[in-house]
Amino acid sequence: MDKPLTDLRALLRTGLSRSLVSLAIKVATAGLTYGMYVLLSRSMGAEEYGLFAFGLSLATVLAILASLGQQTAILRYWPEETGRGDMAKAEAALGAGSALTVAAGLAIGLGVVLVSVGGELLGFGPTAHLAAAATLILPMALAEYWSSALRAQGSVWIALTPRDILWRLATPVAVLVLATAGVALLGWQALLLTAIVLAAALVLQAWAARRRTMSLKTDFVAVPGYWRERGRASRWFLVGTLIDSAALNLDIVFVGLLLGPVEAGLYFNAFRTAGLLTLFMYAITLVVAPMLARHYHAGEILKAQAVTTLCAWAGFVFSLAVFALFVVFGGPILALFGDHAEAAYWVLILLSVGLLFDAATGPARIVLMMTGHERAYVGLFGAIMVAGLLVAIAVIPFYGILGAAMVNAGARAVAQIAISVFAIRRIGLDPSLFGILAILRLRGEASAPLPPAR
């Protein structure tokens, strides 16, 4: 039997089996998250729910900023250094990344609290939701980093279960208990509750990781040396992940600022619903990223292309099925948030079209990030999405949430195509559905006889 083909099949089986575990967790996560949003929307009222949505979106963006790109860096550096047999350097990278995340999370959270207090003293209206959002920044940043660190070490269950299952199960249960007792949460109270429950989930994650002898250490001493060597790349990782998060959250912030909390709540519901479309793509990417980094940096291009193509096809088939579901049942799905939420049906469809392009172009972002082309990712994706956000600011006052959705979908489609073309031409990996043709080409080259010696 052809050994390279056997190795390739084994690699794909491993990637797919781990991805299915990741998908199972993410499906449960989506259901629990959706349930939490539905309960909050129905128990809080449109305005308070809008303040919650605004605060959560702001905290998500700022948590990505607080991560300083380390959640992406560790996915690349841990497999890269352990592949070379340098465990000391891998451990130093992990500890320094955690230290940077903690320091930045505390600093940014304190800054938001000061802004909230200043706004209250100057009479700028209710700002309690800003202070509550600040308490979410460090836990969200640390949860993202720890998840990446544990996935880089080969764990899926411990990496994802505490944050994605326990947090999202405990929060809606707490909301339901309070609602049954007749307690309707205000926006800031709902944000504070989510922060407390997430912190508890992180404590459980640290305990589980320690039992499995997996590292989640925080090492401030390692920061200077790590930053001297990896600081430049980390800055690009930061900008890249920040832009990616901004593309998913800043629309909601702009809608809240320009139109009001009710519209922000409607757009938030439509965006979070549309996000279900890329659920499998996101789940499989969590597994593929360290595999891609390991094989690419080892010079195993065929294997790197294989896991990339697996990610693209599995994610796209799932996304297409969900898109069809939204077209037929999008209105009733949104109505779960309340009858008024059905008004965002066409917003849901437009956002889904943009995310369908995302799925068709596969893990293009991860390909650039894991192969050392993070700067190119920032330049291409960032420029297009930032331009889209600027256009959205101009469009939202005139065309409302429908205009915001149109701009977001168009910008996302153009950006994904651009970075996919870059990956094909400059890296030699095709992250899109057409990557299957690249596999056939690479297999043919690998099996071709060597030219005769002269």
Image: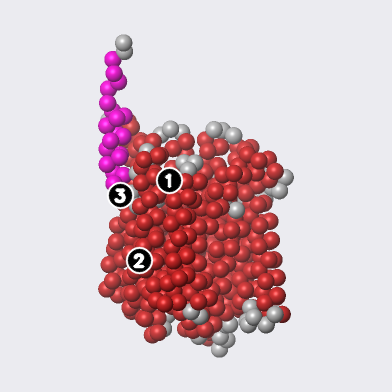
Residue interval drawn in magenta = 434-452
Quote the CA–CA distance across marks 3 and 1.
14 Å
Can you tell which mark lies on residue 352? 2
The residue that mark 1 highlights is 367
- On screen, residue 210 above or below 252: above
Q: Secondary structure at mark 1?
A: helix
Give the spatial CA distance, label 2 vs label 3: 18 Å
Identify the image quadrant of residue 203: bottom right
Q: Is residue 451 magenta?
A: yes
- Residue 433 disc label: 3
Q: Quadrant of residue 111?
A: bottom right
- Choose between 326 and 374: the one closer to the eye: 374
Determine crowd level at label 1: few under 14, some 14-19, many 20+ residues with C-alpha closer than 10 A.
Answer: many
Q: Earlier in the sequence, mark 2 or mark 3?
A: 2
Query: Which residue: 70% across, 80% down?
Result: 122
Asked which colour scheme the image uses, the reply is: secondary structure
Name the spot of residue 381 as percent of width and height, x first: 44, 53
Type of the residue with mark 1: Val
Q: Position of 100 compared to 318: left or right?
A: right
Quick check: is 209 in the magenta stretch?
Answer: no
Question: Magenta: predominant secondary structure element?
Answer: helix
* Quadrant where the image shows the N terminus: top left
Whichever of labels 2 and 1 marks the residue nearer the N terminus, that label is 2
Q: Amino acid at mark 3?
A: Leu
Answer above or below: position of 356 versus 340.
above
Coordinates of residue 173 in the picture (x, y in percent): 52, 76
